[in-house]
Image (cartoon, helix red, strand yellow):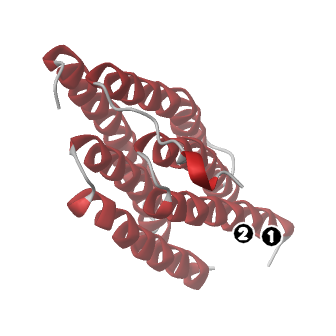
Amino acid sequence: MHGFFLGTSIILCFLVLLCLYRGICGPGVLNRIAGISAIGTKTLVILLLMGVIYGRVEMFVDISMVYALLNFIGTLAVSKYLEIEGEI
Amino acid sequence: MSAINFISIFFILSGIVFFFTASIGLLRFPDFYSRLHATGKGDTLAVFLCFLGVSFFHGFNLTSLKIIFIAVFMLLAQPTATHAISRAAFRCGVRPWMKKKGEDK
């Protein structure tokens, strides 16, 4: 069962690399924000699977919760800033 | 390997499939709004399925309840963030992608 979780984490890391292309050279600020938000969403699942692999889920769940909150608030803050600024 | 493990593997594998389609959509769609459409819906369902699978694997206790709480929170937060960023893009003047007039066949 641990091998399955390890393989799933490796596939997710590969998908993070795919999203990082959009984060680095996507045209404009908004595409970069979309890519970084997708990377943060995948990082949540990677953190939880790491917790299962190490056998300490009850510690990694709290880190995952904080990461979800930070990802959400960061995306909201950047979008509000762009909306007030009015120009990209 | 018990039945709980099979249910967990099924949920996590379907979540991985949704993650894969969302990433391909983010990489290959032509326009900002369509990219956001791919990643906003696909990632939400994928996170929900993966967390449900890990929660089934872990059993029934407080940690599993916390995992379900994070899944429900992501189910609320991800569409809100997608809506906020797409509204910011619309107010900044990003136009949606249209087909050219000559090639609509």
Residue at 67% of width from left, 60% of height from top? B57
Q: Along the line of sight, which residue is nearer the eye, B30 or B79?
A: B30
Distance between the alpha carbons at the discs numbered 1 and 2: 5 Å
Total marks shown come to 2
Dot 2 amino acid type: Ile
Work out whether A56 lies above or below B73.
below
Q: Quadrant of residue B9?
A: bottom right
Compared across the picture, whether A7 is left or right of B95 comes to: right
Q: Residue furthest right?
A: B3
Q: Residue furthest top?
A: A84
Q: Quadrant of the N terminus of chain A?
A: bottom right
Q: For the residue carrying disc 1, how many other residues have a C-alpha within 10 Å: few (<14), some (14-19), or many (20+)?
A: some
Residue at 52% of width from left, 42% of height from top? B98
Q: For the residue carrying disc 2, how many other residues have a C-alpha within 10 Å: few (<14), some (14-19), or many (20+)?
A: many
> What residue would you read off at disc 1?
B6
Q: Secondary structure at mark 1?
A: helix
Q: Chain of mark 2?
A: B
Labels 1 & 2 near each other (Cβ < 8 A): yes
Dot 1 amino acid type: Phe
> What residue would you read off at disc 2?
B9
Residue at 25% of width from left, 33% of height from top? A74
Q: Along the line of sight, which residue is nearer the eye, B85 or B97?
A: B97
Compared across the picture, whether A76 is left or right of A50 comes to: left
Q: Quadrant of residue A56?
A: bottom left
